[in-house]
Image (tube, rainbow, N blue to C red):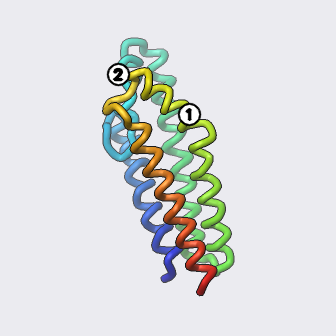
Amino acid sequence: MNQLTIVTIGFLLLEATNVIALYFFPGSKYANAIGVFKAWEKSKADPEIHNFVKYLVNWVAGTKLIFILLLVVILIVADQRTLLFSGIALVISIASFFWRLFPLIRQMDREDQLVPRNYSIVLGWMIGGFILIFLTAIYLSLSI
């Protein structure tokens, strides 16, 4: 088992906890569920808006589940070359967070819409860390 496989398994486990949180405990403030957004509680005052928000949360969870299961299949059947390209694809897809989501969550953080404060910074560092870990694993896989 090479470094890229180990990092991918770690990423899968982290994402699996997020899927469980989104499906079964969406209001949680753990495992990157949406309880950190003050709007989650506010949406409960309007059933139409809350149902829409719940729909989007479950849509995200379902998309992540597809992503996870495809990665499991890749880990089971892929050769080293496919695993390497999958790692590169993961870096690109994870980095997309900084294109649209990070500016938005950073704005919400500045406008006191998140609990705890500065959650966007922690999330940004965590996602940036994952990108660096994947890039390191890719580099090490290329070096072998």
Q: Nearer the viewer, residue 125 or 61?
A: 125
Find residue 144 and report its horizontal and vertical position in percent: 59, 87
- Determine the CA span between mark 1 and mark 2: 22 Å
* Residue type indicated by callout 2: Glu
**Which secondary structure lies at badge 2?**
helix
Taking 26 as reference, is 124 left or right? right
Q: Which mark, residue 55?
A: none
Q: Residue at x 52, y 45 (%)?
A: 62
- Quadrant of residue 82 in the image? bottom right
Find residue 21 and report its horizontal and vertical position in percent: 36, 44
Q: Residue at x 41, y 48 (%)?
A: 18
* Earlier-in-chain disc, 1 versus 2: 2
**Which secondary structure lies at badge 1?**
helix
Q: Residue at x 58, y 79 (%)?
A: 141
Label 2 Cα crowd, 10 Å radius (few <14 / some 14-19 / many 20+): some
Q: Is residue 69 above or below residue 73?
A: above
Q: Is residue 13 above or below residue 25?
A: below
Q: Is residue 113 above or below residue 78?
A: above
Q: Identify residue for label 2.
A: 41
Find residue 89 and report its horizontal and vertical position in percent: 65, 60
Find residue 42 and report its horizontal and vertical position in percent: 37, 17
Taking 128 as reference, is 77 left or right? right
- Quadrant of residue 50 in the image? top left
Q: Identify residue for label 1.
A: 103
Q: Residue at x 46, y 61 (%)?
A: 11
Q: Nearer the viewer, residue 30 or 48?
A: 30
Q: Nearer the viewer, residue 54 or 3?
A: 3
* Residue type indicated by callout 1: Pro
